[in-house]
Amino acid sequence: MIHLEIQGSRIPALGFGTFRLTGDTCRRQVLRALETGYRHIDTARVYDNEADVGTALKESGVERTEIFLTSKVWLDDLEPEPLARSVEKSLRQLKTDYLDLCLIHWPSDRFPLDATLEALEAQRSAGRIRHLGVSNFPPAYLRRACDLAPVFTNQVEYHPLLGQEKLLELCRAQGVLLTAYSPLGQGAVLKEPVLDEIGRKHGKTAAQVALRWLVRQDRVAAIPRSSSEENLRANFAIFDFDLDAEDLEQIARLPKNLRRVNPAFAPDWEDDR
Ligand SMILES: NC(=O)c1ccc[n+]([C@@H]2O[C@H](COP(=O)([O-])OP(=O)(O)OC[C@H]3O[C@@H](n4cnc5c(N)ncnc54)[C@H](OP(=O)(O)O)[C@@H]3O)[C@@H](O)[C@H]2O)c1
């Protein structure tokens, strides 16, 4: 496992995502992830699975301090009081007394960013969250957030078929982690023949190549999700090989405009004011 050191905390570069996993499937997969060795788990209020994640955390017997746990506050809860209630609900359902990281799930022009970040800071001072961060923030929003608060990460879609050059440059300049969500392009990346070919050379799959490509980058973490035990384990088996210069060149030449997550309320991704 590769670990990253951000704001004095160690975070595993590979985490386990839980979007669309609910109920017993979620509980079972998070438990398997922890048994496999994952120590970084990503959830959100809106995934409606925090209680299942929390049950798996308890059942695993893994010390809470060994796990890096992230949750997120939804768009309707960005004002101070709803935000405080949202964090409280996350903690209750996750059966823990702190989050390692709490993110603003999406930027919103409906509420002033400074007040939301101040409310997250208050949660940090009270010890309910150890770090605060953002998600789906284009460059202009991220710059503003970094001027207002110690942003730990910007969690955005990133994989071999979607470039994030500008955000990466900004994150590195600001000391912010870029957490790659949908690191397999929700499955689309696996159909790319170039990744498949590189994988065959190393005795690995296209999915493993995509994940290895992400976590070998400076200040990048990746959080793949899987509902299958086999895939969850395969995604963890990426630290016993590396990509060579030729592989990296081939991946760099792939088209970089495949965005899988783009809801109507998404910001202008290119916003770089
Ligand atoms: N902040 C945000 O707005 C945001 C948005 C999206 C996602 N996220 C986070 O990022 C996490 C990951 O993103 P995602 O869930 O969108 O998609 P993803 O991890 O890119 O892709 C998941 C899909 O890939 C398949 N898969 C996983 N491992 C595989 C393997 N080794 N071989 C073949 N297929 C494989 C899974 O199928 P099986 O289940 O069959 O394995 C599933 O269909 C989420 O779970 C969530 O925690 C955050």
Image: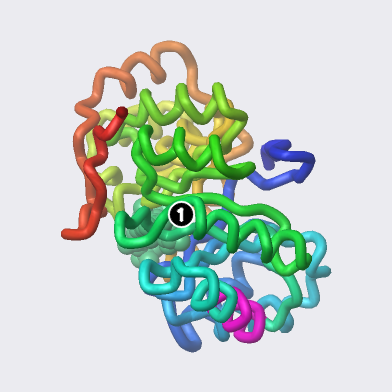
Tell me the quarter of the image containing the C terminus: top left
Q: State whether residue 37 is above or below residue 57.
A: above
Q: Which residues are magenta?
A: 86-94
239 or 261, which lies in front?
A: 261
Quick check: is 230 in the magenta stretch? no
Identify the residue at horizontal 26%, vertical 39% (top origin): 269
Give the image quarter of residue 74: bottom left
Name the side, left or right, on which 33 lies relative to 202.
right
Identify the residue at horizontal 59%, vertical 75% (top origin): 84
Quarter holding ligand 1:
bottom left
Picture coordinates of residue 35 (x, y %)? 69, 67
Picture coordinates of residue 190 (x, y %)? 29, 45
201 or 114, which lies in front?
A: 114
Most common secondary structure along the magenta stretch: helix
Give the image quarter of residue 201: top left
Q: Is mark 1 within 8 Å of ligand 1?
A: yes
Picture coordinates of residue 79 (x, y %)? 47, 69
Q: Which residue is under mark 1?
A: 224
Amino acid at pointer 1: Pro
Observer able to see residue 256: yes
Identify the residue at horizontal 54%, vertical 35% (top origin): 147
User: What colour scheme has been applied to the protein in the rendered image?
Assistant: rainbow
Q: State whether residue 22 is above or below residue 149.
A: below
Identify the residue at horizontal 69%, vertical 38% (top origin): 6
183 or 86, which lies in front?
A: 86
Observer able to see residue 225: no
Quick check: is 90 in the magenta stretch? yes
Tell me the quarter of the image containing the N terminus: top right
Picture coordinates of residue 231 (x, y %)? 46, 59
